[in-house]
Amino acid sequence: MLGPPASDSTGRRALRALDGSSLLEIAKERAKIRWHVWNLLALRPGGFPWLTIAGKQLRGRILIDVDATITTSASKAGAAVTFK
């Protein structure tokens, strides 16, 4: 676990609720997406943009933060959608 139980991400809680076959399908799709992203990054002019932290280059890693919070809300009829 990456943090204390009280700070578990929404994504981690959702994955915990899935069955084995659903998790297998998700793993297959993640593998396809990783392959695609690595190929796109390899084709970048200038090569792959490796991350450097404290003078050390972290090779072979990509960090994509996809955490989100699911909320239920009510809307008024005819209200416009806004993104903030």
Image (tube, helix red, strand yellow):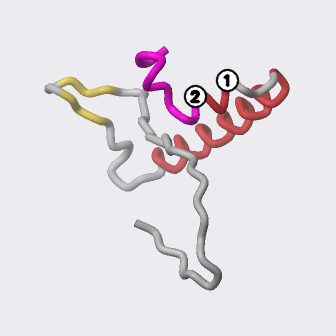
Q: Callout 1: helix, strand or loop?
A: helix
Which mark is drawn over residue 72? none
Asked if marks 1 and 2 touch (Cβ < 8 Å), the reply is: yes
Which of the image's four quarters has the C terminus? bottom left
Q: What stretch is highlighted in magenta?
A: 1-11
Q: Position of residue 42 (x, y in %)?
A: 47, 45
Q: Position of residue 24 (x, y in %)?
A: 78, 26
- Say which residue label 2 marks: 12
Q: Which of 48 and 4 is in front in this view?
A: 4
Q: In this view, does 49 lie to the left or right of 71?
A: left
Q: Is residue 47 left or right of residue 22?
A: left
Does the magenta run of residues contain 10? Answer: yes
Q: Residues within 10 Å of mark 1 (few under 14, many from 20)?
A: few
The total of numbered circles placed on residues is: 2
Residue placed at 65% from the left, 32% from the top?
A: 14
Whether residue 29 is situated above or below residue 46 in the rendered picture: above
Q: Callout 2: helix, strand or loop?
A: helix
Does the magenta run of residues contain 12? Answer: no
Identify residue type, mark 1.
Answer: Arg
Q: Which residue lies furthest to the right in this view?
A: 21
Residue placed at 62% from the left, 85% from the top?
A: 78
Residue placed at 48% from the left, 74% from the top?
A: 82
Q: In this view, does 55 lie to the left or right of 51?
A: left
Residue 52, quarter of the rendered image = top left
Which mark is drawn over residue 16? 1
Q: Residue furthest bottom?
A: 78
Q: Where is residue 49 in the image (x, y as percent from the top left)?
A: 33, 43
Residue 61, quarter of the rendered image = top left
Q: Position of residue 26 (x, y in %)?
A: 73, 34
